[in-house]
Amino acid sequence: MSFVKAIIPAAGLGTRFLPITKVIPKELLPILNKPAIHYIAKELIDSEIRECCLIINKEKRLLSHYFLPTNAPLKKVLSKKKSTILDSVDYLIDHLSYSYIFQKKPLGLGDAVLLANAFVENDFFSVLLPDDIITGPVPAQKQLLDSARNKQASVIGVTRVPLEKISSYGVIDVQEQINDRLFRVRKVIEKPTVSHAPSDMAIIGRYVLDPAIFKALDLVRLRLDNSELQLTDAIEVLINQNYPVFAYLIDGDRFDIGTPTGWLQANEHFEQLAKTD
Ligand code: G1P
């Protein structure tokens, strides 16, 4: 098991950030002078991931342009000025391979992950939702991967959220606390009402998953009509099939850049970080 592949589901419609997302994919909205997806790719590299597959749709094709080599005229101008401004992008291009799969219909996060089955093959793999930008002492995905390698099991990233916000998330029920940050999961529920929420620990967009999740996703799909296929429901199937699933309380600051408020907060935070650098 090498744990070196990651899926980035980026075919969401961006409805919480309209109207700008009518023309610009939310993953390309700037946090300071870099698009949000830049931070995700950097987190992957810092977590020793080598290959990523972005799930996009035809309106999101622009995303792939960011990871193409700089065009010749721009390269010429920059080299004349001895500018290093694009070095951080070249670094992303050199250290991670990028592939793309088109999701034709918005059938949910579970469907997006299922589309990348052939890319993943039979290994543990990462999933990073690019709406969630996380900064901390150790890259968020690396925190999960360390535990997943150690346990040879699925690990999902969680954070504590105020109960009034819990219905926006997948929520875990804890079976056992292993250490300060690691928990064995008994159950996961997608977007429960406050009264049905088993805890205040919400899934944020970081996962390391057992490849058995693909069969679980197929099973969930069988029960569905045309509604969205939820990744959380397939994780619940894994648990019921006795696959161990852990949750890791991520150490870091998390911003939901899928909304104007979260995006603004991320910008303020990164500006502060840049000042103290
Ligand atoms: C998705 C997941 C949910 C998770 C959330 C984190 O929901 O389905 O379990 O808590 O991401 O950002 P979405 O926000 O795409 O509706």
Image (cartoon, rainbow, N blue to C red):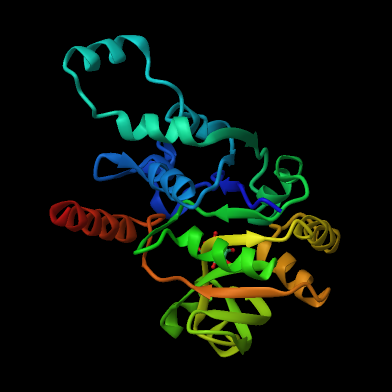
The residue sitting at 80% across, 77% down in the picture is 240
Ligand 1 is located in which of the four quadrants? bottom right
Q: Is residue 259 above or below residue 94?
A: below
In x, y percent, where is residue 60? 51, 35
Along the line of sight, the residue nearer the viewer: 207 or 105: 207
The residue sitting at 58% across, 69% down in the picture is 147
Residue 241 located left or right of residue 67: right
Q: Residue furthest front?
A: 150
The residue sitting at 72% across, 60% down in the picture is 210
In x, y percent, where is residue 165? 44, 77
Q: Is residue 175 above or below residue 252?
A: below
The mark tally for this picture is 0
Residue 253, picture quadrant:
bottom left
Along the line of sight, the residue nearer the viewer: 43 or 197: 43
The residue sitting at 69% across, 57% down in the picture is 228
Residue 94 located left or right of residue 196: left
Q: Is residue 23 above or below residue 75?
A: below
Along the line of sight, the residue nearer the viewer: 87 or 157: 87
Residue 269, picture quadrant:
bottom left
Along the line of sight, the residue nearer the viewer: 176 or 265: 176
In x, y percent, where is residue 129? 52, 54
Q: Residue furthest left?
A: 275
Residue 234 located left or right of residue 78: right
In x, y percent, where is residue 138? 40, 62
